[in-house]
């Protein structure tokens, strides 16, 4: 007997106790989203003129963009570098990135005071703005992700259009459209894949540029000219851990065997990436001599130590262990720590380190802000679960029998 993996739709039931909890969290978040759209941003958040951004930018946008980096890192590995062995994780990573960027865009819409002006950057270009570059790149990359997802949709419905009643007249024309679109995408998809990788590197680093502009408003532990490079390196470092966590959670949720042959190899790559990021981060700290601030018992120093030790040093040591990368549990723990570290890094940069010069108070997210963020995460998981049950995304081991094996089995039964 030999086994192979092929993407397929999953037949497990959709509604479970966990899904019902996610639905409640999503519904709670949608209530606050509706209140924000109807009554203004001040009715839901604790934002002010002193603190114009908070949880929605620090977590929903900045951290969301970084945690969706698995899309371009897996695309670079599977398609650009032609490592066909990793194709099993490309589609799930693509779906996670596509949903991640979709909810990042929704987070930006909610955080803008006049959300109905979200279309302005598309026609009112400002080439000198770092935030403009981030916005345009995110919009274009999100479009690229949906284009990259189209072959999966075509694979699902091509030759299988079964509309009923009067709509049945559309079955043959729609099937021809899908086949034509498939031929066009098969010849041009490499362009979108390369564009996606390039666009990701641009806006991942530009988020760091955005915080450089804050100048003295940021704490010296994070304010550095190499912040764009650190943002890019941290996003690249968290790409594979995010793919690993998503794959292990999906395997557990749908009762599948983890793709450890692929995930262990990804785990072996994470150590050098984390080491490179840590070298630049610590090296920059010593060059600027900002380590003196670690001796002060402040919120900033404690958060910096947590970010580096918990999110970089400990998982780096774990990924250098062979027993860790071969164990589903410890691989999940190590990858989760990297995700927590990047999440802390974005929170530190956009919230903890940011102090307005004339602040009269301290910002802390409201119940509404927390509810929307948790609700967005719940909705992302729900949509992910729905799509993997509808489209061939997750690879499932398929057992095949060779002629020699059949002969051996028959011989053993005689």
Image (cartoon, grey):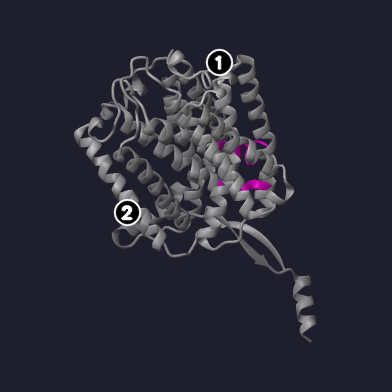
Asked whether the viewer can see residue 90, the reply is no
Residue at the location (48% across, 44% down)? 150
The secondary structure type at the circle numbered 1 is loop
Residue 89, x across and y down, in percent? 59, 48
Residue nearest the observer in this picture, 43 or 157: 43
- Asked if residue 87 lies in the magenta stretch, the reply is yes
- Choose the circle earlier in sequence order: 2 or 1: 2
- Asked if residue 98 lies in the magenta stretch, the reply is no
Quarter of the image where one finds residue 71: top right
Asked whether the viewer can see residue 381, the reply is yes
Outermost residue, bottom direction?
414
Residue 185, x across and y down, in percent? 53, 40
Residue 257, x across and y down, in percent? 61, 61
Q: What's the distance in space between the residues labelled 2 and 1, CA to CA?
A: 43 Å
Residue 94, x across and y down, in percent? 52, 43
Q: Are marks 2 and 1 in contact (CB under 8 Å)?
A: no
Q: Can you identify the residue that label 2 sits on?
A: 24
The secondary structure type at the circle numbered 2 is helix
Residue at the location (46% across, 48% down)? 178
- Structural crowding at the residue carrying mark 1, measured as other residues with C-alpha within 10 Å and reported as few (<14), some (14–19) or many (≥20): some
Residue nearest the observer in this picture, 55 or 121: 55
Asked if residue 355 lies left or right of residue 188, the reply is: left
Q: Label for residue 60?
A: none
Q: Can you identify the residue that label 1 sits on?
A: 225
Quadrant (top left, top right, bottom left, bottom right) of the N terminus: bottom right
Q: Main secondary structure of the magenta part?
A: helix
In the image, is residue 192 above or below residue 283? below
Residue nearest the observer in this picture, 136 or 38: 38
Quadrant (top left, top right, bottom left, bottom right) of the C terminus: bottom right
Residue at the location (50% across, 59% down)? 253
Q: Start and end of the magenta stretch?
A: 72-91
- Structural crowding at the residue carrying mark 2, measured as other residues with C-alpha within 10 Å and reported as few (<14), some (14–19) or many (≥20): some
């Amino acid at each position: 007997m030999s086994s192979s993996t092929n993407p397929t739709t999953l037949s497990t039931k959709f509604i479970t106790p966990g899904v019902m909890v996610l639905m409640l969290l999503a519904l709670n978040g949608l209530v606050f989203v509706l209140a924000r759209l109807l009554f203004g941003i001040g009715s839901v958040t604790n934002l002010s003129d002193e603190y114009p951004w908070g949880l929605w930018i620090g977590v929903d946008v900045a951290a969301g963009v970084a945690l969706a980096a698995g899309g371009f890192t897996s695309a670079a590995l599977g398609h650009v570098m032609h490592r066909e062995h990793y194709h099993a994780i490309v589609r799930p990573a693509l779906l996670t990135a596509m949903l991640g960027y979709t909810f990042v865009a929704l987070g930006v819409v909610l955080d803008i005071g006049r959300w109905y002006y979200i279309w302005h950057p598309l026609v009112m270009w400002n080439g000198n703005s770092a935030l403009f570059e981030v916005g345009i790149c995110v919009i274009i990359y999100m479009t690229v992700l949906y284009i990259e997802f189209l072959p999966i949709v075509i694979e699902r419905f091509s030759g299988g259009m079964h509309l009923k009643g009067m709509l049945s007249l559309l079955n043959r024309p729609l099937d021809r459209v899908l086949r034509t679109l498939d031929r066009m995408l098969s010849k041009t998809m490499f362009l979108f894949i390369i564009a996606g990788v390039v666009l990701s590197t641009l806006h991942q680093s530009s988020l760091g540029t955005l915080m450089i502009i804050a100048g003295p408003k940021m704490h010296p532990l994070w304010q550095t000219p190499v912040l764009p490079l650190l943002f890019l390196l941290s996003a690249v470092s968290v790409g594979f851990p995010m793919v690993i966590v998503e794959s292990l959670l999906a395997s557990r949720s749908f009762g599948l065997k983890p793709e450890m042959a692929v995930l262990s190899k990804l785990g072996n790559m994470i150590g050098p990436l984390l080491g490179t990021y840590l070298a630049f981060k610590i090296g920059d700290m010593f060059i600027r001599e900002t380590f003196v601030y670690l001796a002060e018992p402040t919120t900033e120093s404690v958060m910096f130590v947590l970010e580096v030790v918990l999110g970089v040093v400990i998982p780096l040591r774990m990924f250098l262990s062979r027993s860790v990368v071969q164990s589903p549990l410890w691989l999940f723990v190590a990858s989760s720590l990297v995700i927590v570290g990047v999440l802390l890094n974005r929170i530190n940069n956009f919230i903890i380190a940011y102090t307005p010069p004339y602040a009269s108070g301290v910002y802390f997210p409201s119940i509404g802000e927390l509810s929307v963020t948790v609700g967005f995460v719940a909705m992302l998981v729900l949509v992910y679960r729905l799509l993997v049950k509808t489209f061939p995304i997750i690879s499932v081991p398929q057992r095949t029998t060779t002629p020699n094996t059949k002969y051996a089995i028959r011989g053993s039964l005689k």
